Image: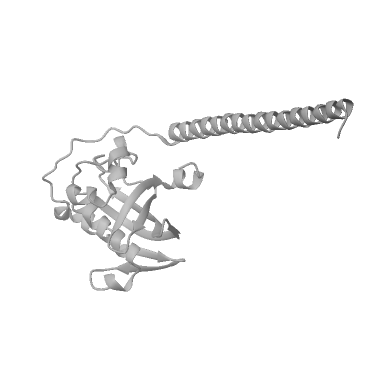
Amino acid sequence: MLSKEELLKQRERREKRKKIFLICICVVVIIFLLFVLVTIILSAINNYAISQAKKKLEQDTNQNYVYPKADYKYDIFTDSSYMRLDRGIWFNNDGEKTVMTDETYKNYPIEAQFMYDVVNLIIEGKFEEYNEIFTEDYLKNAGKDLREEFTMQKLFAIEIESLDSYEMNNLTCWDVQLDYRIKDNNGTFRNDLDFNDAGSIPVVYKLVYDKKSIKVTDILSRYKYDSGLY
């Protein structure tokens, strides 16, 4: 049988181990809370930096143009000068360019076929059908980027190029660049290009395929796409 002195020492050892255990728990909890706090702070700093970078990119690339009054009944195919331009829809496959036509349409990748149809919707001013190519989430969040109505567009020097393909959430995705110029741009479809046809700003359509249909989840200018901020 243990003496009172030995029992006292045993109790003291238990109390000491208990205190050490509680101190360790407290240290672990404090370290965890500090980690969470630092993570939140770093995330906030990162989000702020991205927000500022996006704002600067918007400012650097934003242009304000004055356009003539749009004529929604005008048939662009009656413009002989436009009809003489290169209106072919070119597909760029690693530098090798070929013209897509209604006859050769099925010989191209499905993402190229989809964009071929998109180009024709733009040219023909079919804004209702054009808006149907987007996901519901895009339409909800597009804001000022949504083109609800536009006239027929005199597109020329048209080029489609697939930049990337990948899998996400068991869906096939593509990033497809569409480049073109617009003769006599009236701003109803592209308000980031001037009235004259001096140049172009390529845009990247982000596509998702669920084995049934292709939808557009986002559209980015090539500037935004290359920035990695979006």
What residue is rendered at 18% in x and 35% in y?
Answer: 69
Residue 161 picture location, percent across and down: 40, 60
Q: Nearer the viewer, residue 32 or 117?
A: 32
What residue is rendered at 64% in x and 29% in y?
Answer: 34
Inspect this view and state whether residue 86 appears. no
What residue is rendered at 23% in x and 47% in y?
Answer: 131
Residue 26 picture location, percent across and down: 68, 28
Q: Is residue 174 above or below residue 98?
A: above
Inspect this view and state whether residue 59 appears. yes
Q: Is residue 189 left or right of residue 163?
A: left
Tell me where residue 158 sits by quadrant: bottom left
Q: Nearer the viewer, residue 207 or 122?
A: 207
Q: Is residue 177 above or below residue 91?
A: above
What residue is rendered at 32% in x and 68% in y?
Answer: 99
Q: Nearer the viewer, residue 29 or 92?
A: 29
Residue 207 picture location, percent across and down: 36, 55
Is the C terminus in the top left, top right, bottom left or bottom right quadrant?
top left
Is the N terminus in the top left, top right, bottom left or bottom right quadrant?
top right
